[in-house]
Image (tube, grey):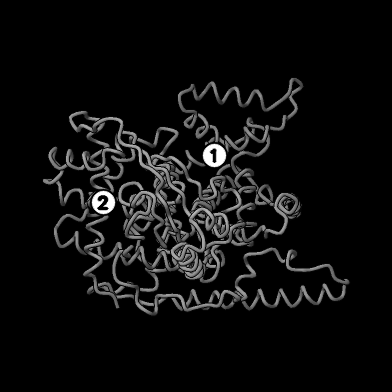
Amino acid sequence: MPAIGPALPQHCQAPDMSPRSTLSLFLVSLGSLLPAQVPEAKQQEQKRLLQQIDEAQAERQQIIDGLLHSIQVNDKTLSPQDLKRETVFLAGQNLIELKILEFIVQEWKDRLIKEEGKKPEDFKIDDGEIEKELKDQLREFAVKYPGIDFWTVVRSQTGIAKNRYVHQRRVTMLFDKVFMPGPPDQWPQITAEAVKAGANNSDGDKFWDGLKKNGRDKDGKPREMPKFWAEMIRKMLIGQLKKWTDIKFPADGLPPGVALDVNGRQWSTTEAFEQIKEGLFIQDMETAISEIVLREALTQELTKSGAYLGAEAFSKAFAEYRKEFDNTIFNTEMIARAFKGYPTLEAFRSRWRLMKSYENMIAKEINNDNLQAHANKHKRFFADGSVNVDVIQFLGKDVRSGAWVPNGMDEAHKRAVACMQKIESKEKTFDQALDAFGEFYTNDKERGRIGNKSFNELRRSLRESEYSDLLQGFSLGYFLFYDAEVGKAVGPVKGPDAWYIVRVNSRAPAKQAANVSDPRTRELVKQDYLTHRFLEWSKEVMSRTKLQ
């Protein structure tokens, strides 16, 4: 299947690395590498492996630094600062949220000291408590998942390295000391107001009074809040405090040197990148480069046509868009990240700006005739059609931790090609090859037998999303749902984190026609129509974009 456009400049591609690279040490538990040995020999082996890990860390940092070069997209040059900031907002979601929280906590800590007579020692954090918690977590994890490195899993799932993980716990503990010290009747006024305001669909004053009452027993002694309630209140507080805080992101017009602004407190791009750098995979950098190049090329094209939304128009349009969701359980951020696959809300906002601008550019073409034609072509999607699929999957990530492995996708492609050759030569049937060679995450219950799925269900099984489609330049799920020949093994074809050999077993037709005369159906068709048109237009723009 075709990529979305020309290859990245040579200096923006990661150099080849052997699968035996010491970077692979990040993907397994140190303990699991050590056989039973006498104590002295074991200590020497540990020293040797730790030295290799240090060397691997230096090698990975060198490769990442090597990717940070200026890139020219047509006539505009993107600086290393642009690339660093893009990487922060594609791979550093948890650290971004942590930094916002840290700024809010620091502001209110300073105010409580200055305005309410609190002392700095009231906010002292016990590092011993953090160490004990961490030891308990590591012990529990080792029992549940023997042979899997805790920090590798944390890094692959959150983008947070060990030192930032510990820092995150410190910030959370400081948050509690600032906003939730002791029983609720001792909490500061800002907490009381936030709790009242955050009590959706209920009487805020009544909720707050009940919280204070339950904070003490019948003798007036403080009662420990159940962990579930404490976590719920904490989330409510954070959500409300963020609403009352002026938070600015790059799309709000921040200069390249600033990644984040929270009530005037700024997080520089350099500092932000350094903080996420330890948790980065090389693939994160490559994705960031692809995304920023793609976005710049599309922005240039939309600007030429006069359709690109300016800062004020974008801010107004997005604020209107998110009204529909932000007072519901499925707020805009949840929709962007959980349903559309974006790594951060800021990444979604940047893409949404492009898609809304494109919608304005083709406004005259969004008419009933075109929408009905789209509905007819894709009626199996709109009217409960399905497809039955089996896939042989070759992963670019570690099957246990979910972390990227060095040269993961290249090596996965080689394995997929070798497997396809066995199928084509009739050395193996498709089913035999699936059982013999298929690679699946430990929590994958389907293990290649995806079965009968709707379009969106199929895409979830393939880990595809709106976000990945544009970077990939196509959707494997779309190919399987509509175009792949029934009964034939096809491949290798590329997905977001794996190469596949696929087979469509059967397709079920639409259960009814999709008619755009129905307002709800029309809106669904319109959104899908725009998504398809935007993807095709993006590929066309990238095919003539000049990169240096």
Locate residue 225: give its quadrant: top right
In the rendered image, which quarter contains the N terminus? bottom left
Query: Position of 100 compared to 81: left or right?
Result: right
Task: Judge depth for marks 1 and 2 and give the one in front.
Answer: 2
Q: Residue at x 33, y 52 (%)?
A: 485
The quarter of the picture where the C terminus appears is bottom left
Q: Which residue is mark 2?
A: 355
Mark positioned earlier in the residue sequence (1 or 2): 1
Classify mark 1: residues with Cα within 10 Å, few (<14), some (14-19) or many (20+). Answer: few
Classify mark 2: helix, strand or loop: helix
> Where residue 513 sits in the image (x, y, percent)?
24, 32
Q: Relative to 58, is 517 on the left or the right?
A: left
Image location of residue 505, percent across then percent down = 41, 46
Residue 411 visible in image? yes
Residue type beneath disc 2: Met
In the drawing, does residue 315 fall left or right of residue 213? left
Residue 104 position (above or below residue 422): above
Residue 180 lies left or right of residue 451; in this view the side is right
- Secondary structure under tag 1 reads helix
**Label 2 CA crowd tier, 10 Å (few <14, some 14–19, many 20+):** many
| Type of the residue with mark 1 | Lys
Q: Is residue 222 above or below residue 411?
A: above
* Residue assigned mark 1: 235
Residue 41: x, y in percent? 84, 76
Relative to residue 367, is residue 535 depicted above or below? below
Counting every numbered tag in the picture gives 2
Residue 246 showing in the rendered view = no
- Residue in the foreground of this view, choosing between 373 and 269: 373
Tag 1 near tag 2, CB within 8 Å:
no
